[in-house]
Image: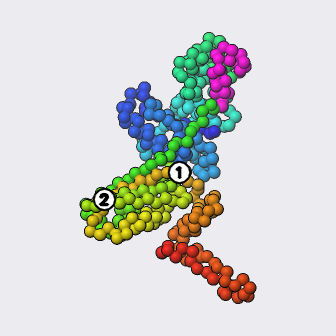
């Protein structure tokens, strides 16, 4: 996997930067890079962030172009330019980035072992963080006692001979020394639940008045959903009223979606069912919108053109999505009246598939 590493020396713990401020800035930078790739790794303890860039070339250009996009993304939060490096080995990308330099260092695929050869053998500890520090330091100390003081010397050692001296960890050390990864960057988990709230100085007494604050709540949450390339499975609405019991409405989406219009229509329909007589004089004083079941989106194309089960309700949802987006008169359903009639206007009649969708 091609990895882009970014390193800020002044944000490392050893540099004495304020802990809380450093953590906030690095978290913001990781958040910004998450819009470029779902594979983002880093911690608040050092000024290092790694992102997986496989597959981004078709959309963003060369690896140097991807690095430039990443630098612009983090520049909003961290004014200092980091040192960057790209390699198929996470370890080599980290070592090159930590080594400094103003230009983006790109290691061509296949040159990882040569690039690692000159580093001291202790550098391998950066590439196998799943091992306890004590066991890793003990294995690397044994390698030094055997005269294997550089990564290149270790890479030329036979696996059986090394395992006899340092134990089972020998396989991991040799894999790293020869330019291969032992730990892939895991996808950042999507937020399973998102929440937004709004309070109203003047109570809302009709659903029409409530549409505008509902759209603001939807926009606030959908920005975060789309940023992570996700979609919504369930939307829950909780309305607090002046005197009566609160009102709850649930919209379960047949297909995960991030379309505001579709979710809004489903929530309004659920509210109309919950409030058969409307809000009346007992107005709404606050609203809480929650997204549950935030899932990875299947793509940017219309749901009708994407993968779906043959269930009728999902087909209806797909055609309704097109009707909402392009107009109810664009989705028609034909009924065969007389298959033997030579005149087409009498053979088939056409009607709107979703007359409930208004312009």
Q: Nearer the viewer, residue 242 or 194?
A: 242
In the picture shown, does residue 107 fall above or below 213?
above
Helix, strand or loop under label 2: loop
Residue 165 lies in the magenta-colored region: yes
Q: Are marks 2 and 1 in contact (CB under 8 Å)?
A: no
Residue 58, percent from left and from top: 63, 51
Mark nearer the viewer, 2 or 1: 2
Residue lying at 72% horizontally and 87% vertically, measured from the top left: 341
Which image quadrant: the N terminus? top right
Residue 164, percent from left and from top: 69, 14
Q: Nearer the viewer, residue 315 or 120?
A: 315
The CA span between labels 2 and 1 is: 32 Å
Q: Write the start and end of the magenta stretch as one range.
A: 156-180
Q: Which residue is mark 2?
A: 245
Residue 245, percent from left and from top: 30, 59
Mark positioned earlier in the residue sequence (2 or 1): 2
Q: Nearer the viewer, residue 256 or 125?
A: 256
Q: Which residue is mark 1?
A: 295
Residue lying at 32% horizontally and 58% vertically, measured from the top left: 246
């Amino acid at each position: 996997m091609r990895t882009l590493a970014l390193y800020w020396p002044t944000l490392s713990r050893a540099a004495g930067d304020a802990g809380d401020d450093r953590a906030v800035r690095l978290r913001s930078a990781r958040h910004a890079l998450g819009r470029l790739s779902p594979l983002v790794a880093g911690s608040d303890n050092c000024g290092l962030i790694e992102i997986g860039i496989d597959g981004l070339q078709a959309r963003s250009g060369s690896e140097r172009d991807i690095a430039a996009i990443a630098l612009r993304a983090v520049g909003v939060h961290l004014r200092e330019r980091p040192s960057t490096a790209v390699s198929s080995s996470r370890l080599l990308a980290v070592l090159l980035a930590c080594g400094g330099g103003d230009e983006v260092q790109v290691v061509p695929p296949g040159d990882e072992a040569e690039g690692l050869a000159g580093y001291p053998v202790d550098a391998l500890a950066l590439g196998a963080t799943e091992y306890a520090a004590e066991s890793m330091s003990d294995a690397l100390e044994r390698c030094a006692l055997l005269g294997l003081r550089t990564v290149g010397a270790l890479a030329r050692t036979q696996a059986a001979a090394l395992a006899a001296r340092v134990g089972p960890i020998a396989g991991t050390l040799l894999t790293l020394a020869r330019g291969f990864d032992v730990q892939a960057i895991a996808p950042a988990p999507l937020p399973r639940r998102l929440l937004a709230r709004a309070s109203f100085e003047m109570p809302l007494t009709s659903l029409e008045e409530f549409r505008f604050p509902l759209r603001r709540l939807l926009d606030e949450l959908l920005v975060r959903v789309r940023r992570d390339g996700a979609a919504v499975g369930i939307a829950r609405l909780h309305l607090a009223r002046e005197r009566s019991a609160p009102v709850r409405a649930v919209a379960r989406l047949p297909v995960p979606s991030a379309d505001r219009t579709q979710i809004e229509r489903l929530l309004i329909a659920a509210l109309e069912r919950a409030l058969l007589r409307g809000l009346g004089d007992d107005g709404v004083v606050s609203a809480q919108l929650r997204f549950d079941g935030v899932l990875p989106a299947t793509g940017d194309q219309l749901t009708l053109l994407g993968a779906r089960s043959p269930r009728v309700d999902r087909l209806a949802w797909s055609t309704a999505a097109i009707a909402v987006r392009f107009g109810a008169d664009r989705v028609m359903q034909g009924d065969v009246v007389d298959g033997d009639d030579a005149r087409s206007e009498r053979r088939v009649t056409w009607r709107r598939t979703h007359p409930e969708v208004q312009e």
